[in-house]
Amino acid sequence: MIQTPDDTKTVLLVEDNEDNRFIYATALRYVGYEVVEAVSGKQGIERARACLPDLILMDISIPDIDGWEATIVLKADPLTRAIPIIAVTAHVLPDDERRSMEAGCDGYLAKPMSPATLIAEIDRRFGRPTHAQITARADSRDVRV
């Protein structure tokens, strides 16, 4: 995805699993997002307040303060309450999604998920065409009659 410096969006990725964090952060950077990383609820809250990202991806099972509690804290803070938070979690029981929404999450994605699924959801929230849509448009221009 080609972006100009003026429309670069910052995503805070709160994820304690090193493999997941690496995969998601790498994919997001590849398509042009700036990524700030945190490995615990406490660090996520601190980084959200410091950098005021455009969107937060919040794992639920994280050290110090779980993702639900971190979301409650961020949504209660006037400085961060308007930042959309998407729960990205392996908590996939029916009550887990409800609990995420009650904590203040604006969206819910169940793990495991592909990086493409994550990117498509973030692109949708920012009103951007997805990578697949851009590729399809480029391919359609190559068709000669």
Image (tube, rainbow, N blue to C red):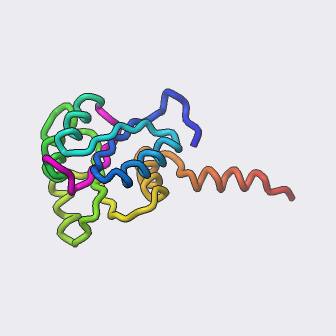
Question: 82 or 53: which is nearer to us?
Answer: 53
Quadrant where the C terminus lies? bottom right
Residue 59 colored magenta? yes
Residue 130: give x, y in percent of width and height: 53, 51
Q: Is residue 58 visible?
A: yes
Q: Residue furthest bottom?
A: 94
Give the quarter of the image for residue 76.
top left
Image vertical order of residue 40 relative to residue 7, above or below = below
Residue 88: give x, y in percent of width and height: 31, 56
**Total numbered labels placed on residues in the image:** 0
Name the residue: 48% across, 41% down: 29
Name the residue: 28% across, 64% down: 90
Residue 31: give x, y in percent of width and height: 52, 44
Give the quarter of the image for residue 37.
top left
Residue 107 colored magenta? no
Give left or right: position of 21 versus 93. right
* Span colored in magenta: 52-64
Name the residue: 25% across, 35% down: 48
Main secondary structure found in the magenta portion: loop
Residue 96: give x, y in percent of width and height: 20, 65
Give left or right: position of 12 versus 41. right
